[in-house]
Amino acid sequence: MSLSEQARTRAALVGTALVVPLLFFHRAAFSEEIFISRDILRVYYPLRKYWVERVSQLQFPDWYPYDGLGQPYAGMPISGTFHPANLLYLLLPLGTALKAVTLLSYVAALGGTYLFARSWNLGRGPALLSGLSYALCGYMVGISNNLLYLMAAATFPWALWGAERFLRQPSPGRAAAAALPLCLVLLGGDPQSFAVCNGLLLVLALPRPGQGRGARALPWAALLIVLGALLSAVQIVPTLHVLGQAHPSAGTLDVATRFSFHPLRLGELVLGPLFVDPEVGAVSSPGLADQVLDSGMGTLWVDSVHLGATACLLLLGALWAHRRQPRVWWVAGLALFFLLLSMGRSLPLYGWLYRWLPLWGSFRYPEKLLPYFLFPCALGAGAGLEALEREPSLRRRLGLAGLGLAALCGGLALAEGWGGLFSRGVVGSRWATPDPAVLELIHGNVVRMSLLTAGAFLLSSLVLLGVERSGPRVGLLAAMQLGVLYLSNQDTYHVTYPDVLEQTPGLVEQLHQHAPDTGAGRARTVNGVRHISPPEIPGLGPMDVASLYLSAALEPDIPALWNLESATPYLPAASQRYADLYTSLPFDTWWNHFAGLFDVRYLTVDGRTFQQMGAPREQVVSVDRSMGLVLLQHPMALPRAYLAPPVCVPDARSARAHLLSASFQPGREAVIECAGLEDPPLPASGEPGQVAFLRYEPEHVELDVKAPGPEVLVLNDAWYSGWSATLDGEPVPVLPANVAVRGVRVPAGAHRVVFSYRTPGRFAGVAVSLGTLVLLVLATLGLRRTSAMYP
């Protein structure tokens, strides 16, 4: 092939990698609509908005004040503080930037899979089929609702591609090409994928062609792991300081294995999403999700895991064609391992790792591991297409197998259509209180998807049996695979109008009027909606209305979009001290006894819950009749900062016990943990102290206090190591007060108290990461210069 032909081929491949994802996601790519589903609205828009606000003012976001009384920002991997894609948020509007990052993730997933397939000697057509099958499979389309997992799934193929090249021919440049994507997996916010990728580097080194090459490659793989960790130190070091203080995301095996992949969904790999309401694009029944599919969360992690009939047929061809190659079965066994691991609640494997593997106990949601099963499956599809060129007899075998599978899917459609084989016979029998409407929906899905899959198998067989030329055959099979993925999964990603981010909900406007910003802390809210019932709005779809409803209800952490704090500990770095108080008590108990203690002044509830609460009318701040929501004010909320006499206790358990005792007097005493310090001062007189805010910023708070006697200044923001304080310029300890917030002991008289926060280990992490990057660049440039001098 001439140089110009190579250039045209490469340009065509790059254009395909860019254009196909845009066409697939045309509802987002060619409109003003933005991605909105689930955590995109609850988590990523608020986090990215805050990052832009701080960085655009040349300030580093050490502390995030908008979730659970505040928590570290840089020490929370989900924040993606250091990922270079964040630069787009400085250049584009919030919704547009997130859409661009999402769409580019699909381009990256396709490109990384293509390159890795090429490194394993697949031709361009088969490698492209692998890229399409992975990047646009049901899981990847569905995970558009959770940006960090999409970015990790899109990035790890690049890390494996770089590692494969480095293991074949080690050099500083190739080491950087492998270690940088590995680092980006963590910087995107997914520690579990980072850990899995590190393990995969060792696995990748083992089945090397040639005797003894695997053992020789292991030290090089270990070097890549070390380099990836050093480049990631900017995120690893701050995260290590958060561990032990943050509320554990997977405190028990039951919590850790929520969102497990259920074996009943295995058929989706071939057929498509069977449990999704096409009008909603999601599972609409919590009972189905929990009682039948054992989700534990009232919904599914992703609504589709569809790989496609054509890809599955070619995967069977690859396994048959390479059945005598140990490396193929090594990869197949690894893929099966991740599939079994993703079935956390149905099999004991995940529980074994949770109990016995260090650090694995901090991870949760086994279904997150499905990309590590689907990626090798997509590679296998490409390998099957490649094998057709070497074994002409395989085309006939696969063609006949496709005809048999088409007949099998047609039979399933008939059995479901006549007798409800799957919907009533399988799903209905597992459901304690089946919903007839949902069973009917599943019935329709099974019939439709079975017929679609039968058609895909039939057409694939006709191409395999009837098209002799390689080029047209590859093109037709790739087109069919893409078409089936589109038809099956187009409804499982969700977009809506950018007005959700730009128009302030009515309750928020009322709240801003009721609690204007005085420089003493933003209004702190909590969501108490128990009966979610979005209204029907003409001209808007279910997802549009659901997004508006969640925003109006001030679901966590959506209030941050309008500079309001959410008291719900929703994000993973929320203080364990506060989260334990919040989650271990019934919500009504927490609201009545502890919300006011921590300056949580506002509560949103639905109308039905409001009636059940029996709250007095004078607590009602505002009513949103269009959404059926009520905004309430706490009748006895304490200020953001106040002075109180101290009650000294030795530890958090004792402090909690005192808070829960009948003798505790909120506002008239402050429970501080002063073990190891001198005895607390004598109680102050009955004269109230005075506190005035001079400056209130996320990492810097200045107050003037006038104490009538020795007292404790309580600042109702989360206590965390990394906070320091000065009293009249002299350092003083920041003590846990009332279990969860900050306290400083002050003597009688007028004083100035300053609280400051810096992410522990941030500068050390930055130095290690930058130093490693500089050394890699210098080594690469030095090697190139040496090669040029001594060719």
Image (cartoon, grey):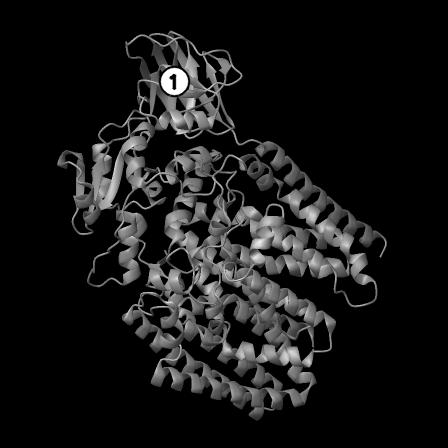
Q: Residue at x 54, y 86 (%)?
A: 402
- x and y, in percent, of residue 31 in the image: 35, 62
Q: Quadrant of the C terminus?
A: bottom right
**Above or below 305: residue 645:** above
- In this rendering, position of residue 483 left or right of residue 636: right
Query: Hey, which quadrant is residue 504 in on the image?
Result: top left
Query: Hey, which quadrant is residue 642 in on the image?
Result: top left
Q: Which of the two residues, 89 or 425, is positioned nearer the viewer here?
A: 425
Residue 120 makes an appearance in the image: no
**Above or below 434: residue 55:** above
Graded by Cα atoms within 10 Å as few (under 14), some (14 to 19) or many (20 or more), the crowding at tag 1 reads many
- x and y, in percent, of residue 93 in the image: 38, 49
Q: Quadrant of the N terminus?
A: bottom right
- In this rendering, position of residue 726 left or right of residue 600: right
- x and y, in percent, of residue 534 in the image: 24, 56
Query: Hey, which quadrant is residue 199 in on the image?
Result: bottom right
Q: Residue furthest bottom?
A: 466
Q: Which of the two residues, 683 or 282, is positioned nearer the viewer here?
A: 683
Residue 115 makes an appearance in the image: yes
Q: Residue at x 51, y 34 (%)?
A: 245
- In this rendering, position of residue 447 left or right of residue 329: left
Q: How many marks?
A: 1
- Residue type beneath disc 1: Leu
Q: Which of the two residues, 696 or 601, is positioned nearer the viewer here?
A: 601
Tell me the residue that label 1 is attached to.
713
- x and y, in percent, of residue 330 in the image: 69, 68
